[in-house]
Image: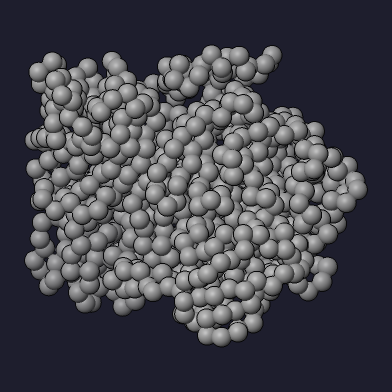
Amino acid sequence: MLTRLFRLCPHGRLRSTGLIALALAAVVAALLPLTGGGAATAAIGAGAPDPRHPMAAPHEPVVPADAMEPTAPVLPRDGWTVSASDEETASENGRAANVLDGSTATIWHSKWSGTAAPLPHTLTVDMHRTAVVSALVYQPRTNSPNGRVGSYAIHLSADGTSWGSAVASGTLGDDATAKTLSFAAQGARYVRLTATSEAGNRGPWSSAAEINLLGDPGSPASVVDLPRTGWTATASDEEAGAAANAAANVLDGDPDTMWHSRYSGTAVPLPHSITIDMKSARDVSALTYQPRRSGANGRVGAYTVTTSTDGTTFGTPVASGTWKDDDTVKGATFSRTVSARYVRLTATTEAGGRGPWSSAAEIRLSAPANPATAGSWGRITGFPLVPVATALLPNNKLLAWSAYGVDRFGGSNGYTQTAIMDLGTGVVTQRRVDNTRHDMFCPGIAVLKDGRVLVTGGSNAERASIYDPATDTWSATGDMNIARGYQAMTLLSGGDAFVLGGSWSGARGGKDGEVWSPATGTWRKLSGVPVTTTMTADPAGPYRADNHQWLHATSDGRVLQLGPSKQMNWISTEGDGSVTAAGTRADSADAMNGNAVAYDIGKLLTLGGATAYENTTATRRAYTVDLNGGGTPVAARTGDMDFARAFSNSVVMPDGKVAVFGGQSYPVPFSDATSSLTPEIWDPATGQFTRMASMAVPRNYHSVANLLPDGRIFSGGGGLCGDCATNHADGAVFTPPYLLNADGTERTRPVITGTVPARVAHGATVPVTTDSAVTSFALVRAGAATHSTDNDQRRVPLTFTRNSTTSYTLSIPSDPGVALPGSYLLFALDSAGVPSKARMVTVG
């Protein structure tokens, strides 16, 4: 429960009340009856970790302290009121006001005596002032499961009358834990929670013990940085004697220079202010503050942001708050978009109380994103679990799973929490999978040639399971010869599956290659494919050095292992197998938790990562790897990303561009510090990255991203650390700019008409008709993502013959090493690069 697990700190943020491990163990013990404690106990083998203490699992880092504290502050509830569509007052005190009384012993309950009020039910909070709000924290009642909210939607309003579309929706798990329902930060006075189902379908009821709202996390969605060319900065005072700490340094693009208030001689007392002159009026909606790198002194604590059109008259603050005393980049979301020439940041306290100082390395301003150039984000969709792993299914659904728990992992419990999102309706359903005796946390994944999903290892390290979307069933297949977790997998050109690495589970080291046969359901060890030649130089040794490998299957059962080690290798899976060195990835260092994406035939983009799994600086660098020149791949550095990233996810789009989401500049599992909230898209024609509309929710360790059949991209997940604030049991869909006009409306897109075969052979020709002229076609293989790795996705541009303006004959590649067998999205693109909605085709 929220009030038991957290207390309010002096600065108004939630903080853990006790030792992290004790809190996690206590909550897991409380949840065991809800997650099948009896089954869990029965599944514990001799010497296996006790699932009642999941974070004691030996192969995972301790949850950092900042993971226990939400980025956004809890808003003070003084003066708030709440109303409901209906409430029970006859047979119990179920008034709406109870959700604001600070007691979990009192509840709001929909009317149930006499004739029960039917669903949906609503709760509307009136803050009686405009505030930036980014999440609703829902605490279910504690004395009964009745009325727990299942499906929900959240709406915001400035006046209590105009509500617009939902900013968040989803499905909650049927348990008593507090739920944080996030959405894009924005100014509002009214927040409405609508319950459309009861979590356990026990009746037409809704209830809540407490409702809290979270304020500004400093990460507004759908904004982009304004170019700073020609801007100037002035300050109330600056240090010019002992150091060159002029205000202009906040605009120079160098985080190692800074503005500092005057401290030599007699220090100038707080408050201090710095004013940005953009030289002309612009729409602006957020400010980003980067603290100095060289020390803690002068970090801004309490602040306000004001704006002006003339540099003289500054209005009431458009943002205010208190930033944490650390070196991470901070943000301030404006309560409304304003047109201004001048923006002033005023520091009223020093974050650590160290002295009367203020400083800043960089200051940036952001404006609402132009959808036609930066894309846009849809509402946040809540999941009943943290989607740590996902796979796109051929029936327009997205499969997701976490571990034995919906928000935590640990032990070897023999079951997994799964969910399926219907991409047509947005409805998410939940299921616990017991029959395969497999906890599929931290697995390897391969999408098979018939669209089934093979999942290996993880917490139950030797197990392997298969999900069949045609029958919506899970089944077990043969155990691996080598127990693994954090391994990498890929389908081979002949339809077998190859696995390598994975020292997170089982014994450390020795995670050599093996191959699974769909004909026998058994595994064959490859004595000639030792993992040692493919590992990074991680200081943690094999436990980290053989994780999350980038594997690209080619012809004749061969695989290019192109990272994250800087050394690349060709792997043959014939017979006992063999490994042949394939050169280095140009001047790249090891890039653990980076990405590799096949954007064209025999062409891959690698980007981001770090020299070690965690606690080291990530890179902005990106490289192309070309396999088309013969035996040795040719690697070359391409344009850098604007943001350093590890734990990010990358997706190839129908036009061959690659979108990258999330990640951290300093990777720390379970933490949201140093998050990269601005996606970028790489263009192979220019080799450059372009910033996209920013995300509302950080996506770091344990996050995912998948291309969807309509050309949009799902980005979600992150966390899975039990009672932490960095669990993100949700996701959102990004609409790339190729689908949007400047006003946010969807561009007219081509349509594939007529019948497209459900299955095509390699080397076949396929007739296709469209409703208008198109200029290209592409197949994009259905992806399966986990832990920043998706070895399944690849884009295959197709050659074709134009028969008429709207009639074409497509040529499917004859080589299964080019078009790997399996499920593909077939897109048609017009001359402007606008893709059709895809038809699903099985190749091979």
Image quarter of the C terminus:
bottom right
Identify the residue at image location x=59%, y=55%. Answer: 782
Evaluate whether residue 167 shows in this view: yes
Which residue is more in the foreground, 171 or 595? 171
Which residue is more in the foreground, 279 or 633? 633
Indicate the position of residue 106 as horizontal and vertical percent values: 19, 19
Indicate the position of residue 65 as horizontal and vertical percent values: 43, 33
- Horizontal placement of 510 versus 121: left or right? right
Image quarter of the N terminus:
top left
Evaluate whether residue 328 shows in this view: no
Residue furthest bottom as drawn: 804
Identify the residue at image location x=34%, y=27%. Answer: 201
Indicate the position of residue 127 as horizontal and vertical percent values: 13, 41
Residue 27 image-quadrant placement? top left
Indicate the position of residue 553 as horizontal and vertical percent values: 74, 57
* Rendered position, 466 above or below 166: above
Which residue is more in the foreground, 403 or 301? 403
Residue 74 image-quadrant placement? top left
